[in-house]
């Protein structure tokens, strides 16, 4: 394994701890306010969240296929799968934007005229929504960075830089993209599937 | 300033007075640590000086290359560690002993606010930046913060506890020496942090009796009762008749069944939360969203008065009764009926 | 300069992992509709952990990686658990009270009079 | 290493116009766009020195304020001074001090590499540092921030009327600079070691910085997200640390100290590495118990992550959690003690000389011992309650940070200055400065231990009059200390221009860095060295004690 891959793994550990701070806060408050957390589930669109999970998993598949194509020196396939990954990534962000918009319409953004239909949870539910926006927001920022990296990959692939002898950048960006997927795999059940749906 | 130098030296203090029951034991641990540290420091200093001088560089004398010694490494890991275990055990023992107040502790309420300490006594007396306590009597302070984190500290008593907004903190001590001792805020709380301090006066029994004259506005509970009526609490929380709200008589420090199945003790923190954010915990059998939020409407001091009033409705309960199991009181007759979860 | 020889994954394996991930996503959504009490979160986290492991093991090629990479993965998880568990332990044990043993209160009260 | 004797690469004696990393290129572009780890280290050296004097000036000002019990400046001014002092010193001096300068310069050379694993990332790290420093300095210029370096919520998120956002963003950005430095070191040590440079042959300085890198990589991101959550909370006026919606301000402290306690080891571990190098060189001896010293660095790195709760014993943290943290805090003292004993034992049967770096090394051992032992008072629950939030804490961590870390930094700078610049400095002046700093330091901070147990709270702009004598003493010490720090500035500046040429190995030390010319060439080695010897090979092993 070469230095750049080790560097990428080290960076990903950093990322784990970066999101870890928010997961720790989530664990603490979920234990502290189980009712308020459960009550938010009716505002979380499981269909959209689930679709987004599937979209990201698809993008992970196309990403790993792009890496495979690079290992096999198949330039056209690298480009094809990179573009597919970017399409899935963009689709994820578009769906996310719709969700954010509906939160805005429903006054569920803490600090911006937050209104909750259950006054008993008016205070504590804000904690969950604050965490929801921080966690998904940070995740979305990582997605946007990832799309930037994929664009770079596409340009490089077009210039025929990658081959079976040199594909470390594809591998590294692949690792990053999968990591972002893994974060979402945890965010989905923790944010969308909290309460029992009746 | 130079002219005042002799004065400075005259004022020079090197060790704080020990004026509480816990100060002595903590000082013993402190001196144990000082002595251990001094032995270690002097030992290391002497060893460095001795070795550096004895093996100073001389012509034609070469250093002897030594790999190391597992025996030495293990001994200078394990022996200090054993000494540290003593410190750990000692420190933890004193810390545990200082956790909960004795049952007969006198209760005083302290509210931290940028930048003052507001003190309220059960008899209704109020003070700012001053605390009067009788000698020899365990005193429990219930600490509340109106804004940011403060820390209540009396060095002469070797006690300190942060006052975190959002819940009650507490500490206790037994003053042993009459006198005046300084009181500080030791958690940085903003601009005038340094002026958020005052004096603790430890009075002997006679002095204390003459000082404790009672508040001009009645006892804390009476002040609370006034608030209870002014804020319309009494329209729902009727004293003896079940309304839309739980009866408060006899509730203090008793277990309460909540609508989500949990049971909590109706202690100070619970009552505080139930006043400021009443929907946070709903007693089983009652509807949420009936009582208005009093967050922002009542100051922490007023909340303390209200709690004192609620306490006074449970007259047999001593002031401090934590951790004592009691027969659950039925405060909601409906709770006996088959539990029906209120529709949400 | 990727001179290391990573075995090239089979497309079939990758698609199989993808299918498993999709199925698990459906499963975790479905399970959330069952009333399992405390176990809902446990099941959800176990499924998430399985999915994450699949992604790491196959897509991120940990299965072909060196011991060092695996060590780094484990370290990341270990430190994450330190952060969450020790923080959580504070909140979880705040209610555990301790009544001072008689000697301490007696001593405090006794010495003072 | 191809050969062991000095100066066998290229010409043994330095010719006046020899090409080195300093004179190979000229012009500001050649510096600002460089990817040479040595030039970046030099850029860092200039930046952190500037920040050190910014932070130091603030310290002098607030020490002057404390001459009078009622204070000389307004409370507002004082609060901003001590807060900015803390923020600048911790995040912009202590954390990057040794790693970004000495280690940046030396690690590639010590492991026998041409550069770090990611030279461009290294440059990016410096730009992030500068970018972060600009945010923080902007806050200073606009009037400062008054939250203390700890940014405790809810004061910082809601109540403070100062430039919290700008200062916090500066810290956030500088955090990434620190992460990238650590990442670079970890990968370099794993992947860039020359043939024959096994883990057991690495200089202890490299071990220490490797351990530091782990802490930087694992801890700093948690600070970053905590600061970010705080910033969001300040902007949105609501957030997870806000007690008004049921948030717990203590959670901020958990997350903050998860980084900031290990961060004190980010600050001290590289210093310990420097001391290992110095004590070996000036005793002409292999470090006693190499393996134990190396592994104690790793032990410190791991244990440092499980002790943070000892900052919160009086906050209402659960008592059983506090007891666990107290126990673990005592554990972390063991590896530190091992190091001190081994350095002392290294001098046994050595050939000890008293050059300036060694004087700093003595200072370090003494002051770090005091700093470490007073840490035990704070790990023990009962005495922590009595001393928390007082000057005892201030004295304790300054003994470790300034008495330990800054001593080690200055020692290392004096040790490797001839390598970095190719010039010698005036030895007599340097010894004098070391003495002044030692005296000034103790005079400043020892009285603060006494003040602390007396109960004088930290962060007070005014204090009860009975504490004046000790405060005057402390301020007197601070002025001596300040002068002590200025002297090296002057002679280093002089030495840069007019110091005598140093030659490749003025101290007669071992290690790859002393076998190449001073200053080194851009790629350090003409050809990749092959290492055949152990570290600190001052002669054949003759004796095994015990």
Image: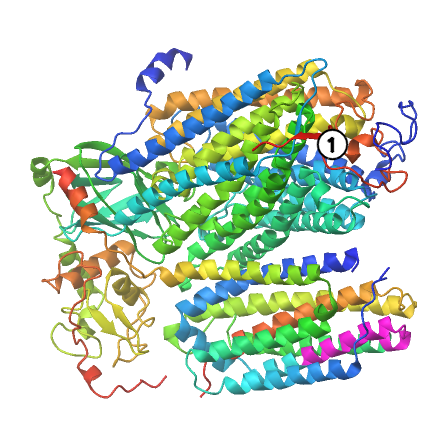
Q: Which secondary structure is most common in the magenta stretch? A: helix
Vertical order, D438 against C33 (above or below): above
Quadrant occupied by the N terminus of chain D: top right
Residue B181 pos. (x, y %): 25, 33
Q: Start and end of the magenta stretch?
A: A55-78
**Chain on which label 1 sits:** D
Dot 1 crowding, Cα within 10 Å, few <14, some 14–19, many 20+ = some
Vertical order, D401 against A12 (above or below): above
Residue D338 pos. (x, y %): 54, 37
Q: Which residue lies under the disc numbered 1? A: D537
Residue ID at (24%, 60%)? B268
Residue ID at (32%, 48%)? B112
Magenta span includes A67: yes
Tell me how many marks there are.
1
Q: Is residue D416 left or right of residue D172?
A: right
Residue nearest the viewer, comparing A5 with A1: A1
């Amino acid at each position: 394994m070469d230095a750049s891959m080790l560097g990428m793994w080290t960076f990903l550990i950093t990322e784990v701890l970066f999101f870890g701070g928010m997961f720790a806060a989530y664990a603490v408050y979920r234990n502290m306010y189980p009712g308020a957390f459960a009550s938010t589930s009716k505002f979380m669109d499981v269909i959209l969240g689930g679709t987004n999970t599937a979209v990201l998993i698809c993008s992970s598949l196309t990403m790993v296929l792009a890496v495979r194509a690079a290992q096999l020196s198949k330039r056209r396939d690298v480009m094809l799968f990179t573009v597919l990954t970017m399409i899935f990534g963009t689709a994820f962000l578009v769906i996310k934007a719709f969700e954010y918009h509906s939160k805005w319409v429903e006054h569920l953004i803490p600090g911006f005229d937050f209104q909750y239909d259950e006054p008993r949870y008016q205070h504590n539910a804000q904690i969950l929504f604050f965490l929801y926006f921080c966690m998904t927001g940070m995740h979305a920022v990582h997605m946007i960075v990832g799309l930037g990296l994929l664009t770079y990959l596409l340009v490089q692939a077009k210039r025929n830089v990658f081959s079976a002898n040199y594909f470390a950048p594809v591998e590294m960006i692949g690792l990053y993209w999968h990591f972002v997927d893994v974060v979402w795999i945890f965010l989905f059940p923790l944010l969308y599937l909290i309460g029992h749906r009746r | 300033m130079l002219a005042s130098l002799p004065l400075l030296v005259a004022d020079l203090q090197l060790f704080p007075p020990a004026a509480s029951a816990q100060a002595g034991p903590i000082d013993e641990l402190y001196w144990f640590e000082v002595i251990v540290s001094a032995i270690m420091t002097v030992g290391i200093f002497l060893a460095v000086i001795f070795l550096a001088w004895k093996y100073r560089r001389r012509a034609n004398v070469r250093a002897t290359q030594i790999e190391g010694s597992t025996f030495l490494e293990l001994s200078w890991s394990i022996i200090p560690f054993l000494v540290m275990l003593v410190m750990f055990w000692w420190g933890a023992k004193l810390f545990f002993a200082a956790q909960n107040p004795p049952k007969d502790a006198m209760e005083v309420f302290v509210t931290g606010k940028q930048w003052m300490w507001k003190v309220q006594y059960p008899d209704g007396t109020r003070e700012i930046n001053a605390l009067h306590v009788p000698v020899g009597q365990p005193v429990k302070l219930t600490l509340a913060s109106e804004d940011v984190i403060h820390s209540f500290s009396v060095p002469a008593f070797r006690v300190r506890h942060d006052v975190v907004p959002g819940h009650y903190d507490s500490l206790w001590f037994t003053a042993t020496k009459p006198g005046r001792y300084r009181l500080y805020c030791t958690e940085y709380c903003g601009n005038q942090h340094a002026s958020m301090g005052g004096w603790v006066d430890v009075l002997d029994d006679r002095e204390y009796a003459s000082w404790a004259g009672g508040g001009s506005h009645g006892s804390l509970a009476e002040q609370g009762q006034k608030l209870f009526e002014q804020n319309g609490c009494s329209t729902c929380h009727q004293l003896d008749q079940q309304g839309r709200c739980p009866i408060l008589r006899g509730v203090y420090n008793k277990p309460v069944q909540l609508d989500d199945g949990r049971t909590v003790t109706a202690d100070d923190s619970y009552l505080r939360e139930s006043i400021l954010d009443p929907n946070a915990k709903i007693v089983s059998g009652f509807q949420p969203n009936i009582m208005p939020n009093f967050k922002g409407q009542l100051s922490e001091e007023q909340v303390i008065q209200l709690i004192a009033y609620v306490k006074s409705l449970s007259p047999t309960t001593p002031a401090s009764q934590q951790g004592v199991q009691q027969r659950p009181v039925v405060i909601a007759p409906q709770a006996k009926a088959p539990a029906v979860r209120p529709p949400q | 300069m990727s001179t290391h020889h990573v075995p090239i994954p089979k497309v079939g394996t990758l698609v199989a992992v993808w299918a498993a991930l999709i199925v698990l996503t459906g499963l975790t959504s479905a399970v959330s509709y069952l009333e399992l009490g405390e176990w809902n979160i446990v099941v959800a986290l176990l499924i998430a952990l399985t999915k994450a492991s699949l992604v790491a093991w196959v897509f991120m090629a940990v299965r072909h990686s060196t011991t060092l990479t695996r060590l780094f993965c484990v370290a990341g998880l270990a430190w994450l658990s330190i952060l969450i568990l020790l923080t959580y332990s504070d909140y979880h044990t705040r209610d555990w009270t301790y009544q001072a043993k008689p000697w301490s209160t007696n001593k405090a009260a006794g010495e003072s009079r | 290493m191809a050969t062991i004797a000095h100066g066998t690469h290229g010409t043994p004696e330095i010719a006046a116009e020899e090409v080195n990393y300093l004179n190979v290129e000229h012009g500001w572009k050649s510096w600002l766009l460089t990817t040479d780890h040595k030039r970046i280290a030099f850029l860092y050296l200039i930046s952190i020195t500037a920040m050190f004097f910014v932070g130091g000036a603030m310290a002098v000002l607030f020490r002057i304020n404390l001459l009078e019990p009622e204070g000389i400046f307004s409370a507002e001014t004082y609060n901003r001074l001590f807060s900015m002092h803390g923020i600048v010193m911790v995040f912009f001096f202590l954390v990057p001090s040794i790693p970004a300068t000495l280690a940046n310069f030396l690690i590639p050379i010590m492991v026998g590499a041409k550069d770090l694993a990611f030279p461009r990332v290294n440059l990016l790290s410096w730009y992030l540092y500068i970018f972060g420093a600009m945010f923080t300095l902007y806050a200073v210029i606009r009037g400062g921030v008054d939250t203390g370096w700890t940014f405790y919520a809810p004061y910082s998120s809601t109540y403070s009327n100062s430039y919290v956002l700008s200062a916090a963003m500066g810290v956030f950005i500088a955090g990434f600079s620190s992460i990238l430095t650590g990442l670079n070191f970890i990968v370099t040590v794993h992947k860039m070691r020359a043939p024959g440079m096994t883990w057991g042959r690495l200089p202890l300085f490299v071990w220490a910085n490797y351990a530091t890198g782990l802490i930087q990589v694992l801890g700093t991101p948690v600070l970053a997200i905590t600061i970010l959550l705080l910033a969001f909370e300040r902007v949105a006026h609501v957030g997870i640390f806000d007690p008004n919606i049921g948030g717990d301000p203590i959670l901020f402290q958990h997350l903050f100290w998860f980084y900031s306690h290990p961060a004190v080891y980010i600050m001290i571990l590289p210093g310990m590495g420097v001391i290992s190098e110095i004590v070996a060189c000036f005793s002409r001896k292999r470090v006693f118990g190499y393996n134990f010293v190396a592994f104690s660095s790793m032990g410190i790195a791991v244990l440092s992550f499980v002790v943070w709760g000892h900052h919160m014993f009086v906050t209402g943290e659960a008592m059983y959690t506090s007891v666990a943290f107290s126990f673990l805090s005592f554990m972390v003292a063991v590896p530190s003690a091992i190091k001190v004993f081994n350095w002392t034992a290294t001098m046994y049967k050595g050939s000890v000389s008293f050059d300036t770096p060694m004087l700093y090394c003595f200072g370090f051992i003494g002051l770090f011992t005091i700093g470490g032992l007073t840490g035990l008072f704070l790990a023990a629950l009962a005495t922590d309650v009595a001393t928390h939030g007082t000057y005892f804490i201030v004295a304790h961590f300054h003994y470790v940070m300034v008495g330990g870390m800054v001593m080690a930094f200055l020692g290392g700078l004096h040790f490797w200055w001839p390598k970095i610049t190719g010039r010698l400095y005036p030895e007599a002046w340097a010894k004098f400065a070391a003495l002044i700093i030692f005296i000034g330091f103790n005079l400043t901070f020892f009285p603060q231990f006494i003040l602390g147990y007396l109960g004088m709270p930290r962060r007070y702009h005014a204090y009860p009059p009975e504490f004046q004598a000790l405060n005057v003493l402390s301020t007197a010490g601070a002025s001596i200390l300040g002068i002590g720090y200025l002297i090296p500035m002057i002679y280093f500046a002089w030495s840069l221009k007019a110091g005598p040429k140093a030659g490749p190995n003025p101290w007669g030390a071992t290690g790859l860095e002393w076998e190449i010319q001073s200053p080194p060439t851009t790629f350090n080695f003409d050809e990749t060295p092959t290492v055949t010897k152990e570290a600190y090979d001052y002669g054949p092993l003759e004796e095994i004690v015990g």
